Amino acid sequence: MAAKIIANLIVMGSGILARAVVQAYRQALTNAAKSGVAQETLQNAARRAGKVMTEQEARQILGVSEETAWEEIIKKYDNLFEKNAKNGSFYLQSKVHRAKECLESVYQSKGEGTPPS
């Protein structure tokens, strides 16, 4: 008999708690919409997503100059990419890859072409 009462209390208590959490979440969304926090967060996310790596930044990451041949850029890329794959960070590895992609598009737009890598 006591177990049944305790079980009912637990079930009722969890139902009340679930309703309170849902109501608090709705209120938080309403408050965020009123203060403009939600809109600001979306704008910041769009701003960050729109950032593109510049040629200068890509050259700094790979440690190359404007006169560097494409073959040398690939060697530097391979070296940095492998170092970060073994004992570096995924973030740095990603930056190295994005730098190569950026310079690849620059070389292609200049008409210099890029050999297969």
Image (cartoon, rainbow, N blue to C red):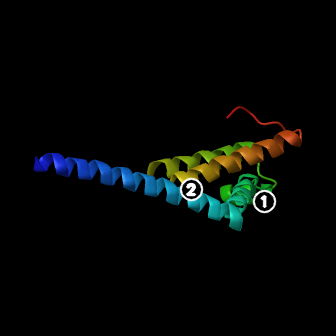
Q: What residue type is disc 2 on?
A: Arg
Residue shown at 69%/68% (left/top)? 35
Closer to us: 49 or 92: 49
Q: Which residue is mark 1?
A: 56
Residue shown at 16%/45% (left/top)? 4
Q: What residue type is disc 1 on?
A: Gln
Q: Residue 48 at x, y = what percent?
A: 71, 57
| Above-or-below relation of 116 to 5 | above
Residue shown at 57%/62% (left/top)? 28
> How many angstroms separate mark 2 from mark 1 (CA)?
46 Å
Closer to us: 30 or 109: 30
Position of residue 26 in the picture relative to residue 36 (left or right): left
Q: Residue 109 at x, y = what percent?
A: 87, 41
Closer to us: 26 or 72: 26
Within 10 angstroms of label 1, few (less than 14), some, or many (20 or more) residues? some
**Quarter-of-image position of residue 113:** top right
The residue at the far bottom in this view is: 35
Q: Quadrant of the C terminus?
A: top right
**Helix, strand, or loop for circle 2?**
helix
| Disc with the residue nearer the chain's start (2 vs 1) | 2
Q: Which residue is mark 2?
A: 26
- Discs 2, 1 touching: Cβ within 8 Å: no
**Quarter-of-image position of residue 59:** bottom right
> Which numbered mark, 2 or 1, is in the foreground of this view?
2
Position of residue 32 in the picture relative to residue 24 (left or right): right
The residue at the far left in this view is: 1
Within 10 angstroms of label 2, few (less than 14), some, or many (20 or more) residues? few
